[in-house]
Image (cartoon, helix red, strand yellow):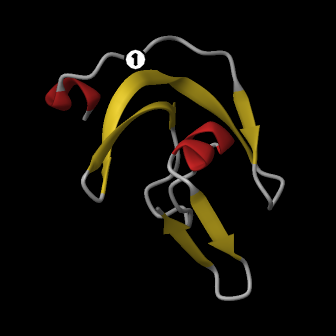
Amino acid sequence: MVDHLGLEIEPSKDSFTFVDYSQRNSGGIIRNLQVQIGNALVLVDFHVLDIKLNWNSSLLLGRAFMATVGAVCDMQTNKLCVT
């Protein structure tokens, strides 16, 4: 998929532990990927994770991205508002 989209992956030795205590290693980092939020384009670095096809998970957003876009999390309704 990365080759199809013309993206370049930098090697990474980072690993991630999820709330269910499962762990995944980073397959690399895609830097400065443009993400459109409303009318704004934000440059974001994404880690590529090798996960199972039917693994129940959502997109993971880091603190730097959330702070940049002014994210507000409503934990009671399980919603994320990006301003």
Please give the name of the residue rendered at 50% of the width and 49% of the height, measured from the top-left corner.
Answer: 69
Q: Residue 36, position in %: x, y?
A: 29, 49
- In this figure, what is the number of numbered marks? 1
Work out whether residue 61 can be spotted. Answer: no
Direction right: furthest residue: 21
Q: Nearer the viewer, residue 3 or 52?
A: 3
Q: Residue 54, position in %: x, y?
A: 47, 64
Please tell me whether residue 1 is drawn above or below residue 57 in the rendered image.
above
Describe residue 62's horizontal placement relative to residue 82 as left or right.
right
Q: Residue 25, position in %: x, y?
A: 66, 30
Direction top: furthest residue: 11
Please give the name of the residue rendered at 62% of the width and 37% of the height, measured from the top-left corner.
Answer: 64
Direction bottom: furthest residue: 77
Q: Which amino acid does label 1 sit on?
A: Ile
Callout 1 crowding tier (Cα within 10 Å): few <14, some 14–19, many ≥20: some
Work out whether residue 15 can be spotted. Answer: yes
- The local secondary structure at tag 1 comes to loop
Please give the name of the residue rendered at 24% of the width and 54% of the height, measured from the top-left corner.
Answer: 39
Q: In which quarter of the image is the N terminus?
A: top left
Please give the name of the residue rendered at 18% of the width and 31% of the height, measured from the top-left corner.
Answer: 5
Q: Residue 16, position in %: x, y?
A: 73, 38
Please tell me whether residue 57 is drawn above or below residue 1 in the rendered image.
below
Q: Which of 59 and 50 is in front in this view?
A: 59
Describe residue 22's horizontal placement relative to residue 48 as left or right.
right
Quadrant position of residue 21: bottom right
Residue under pointer 1 = 9
Describe residue 59's horizontal placement relative to residue 16 as left or right.
left
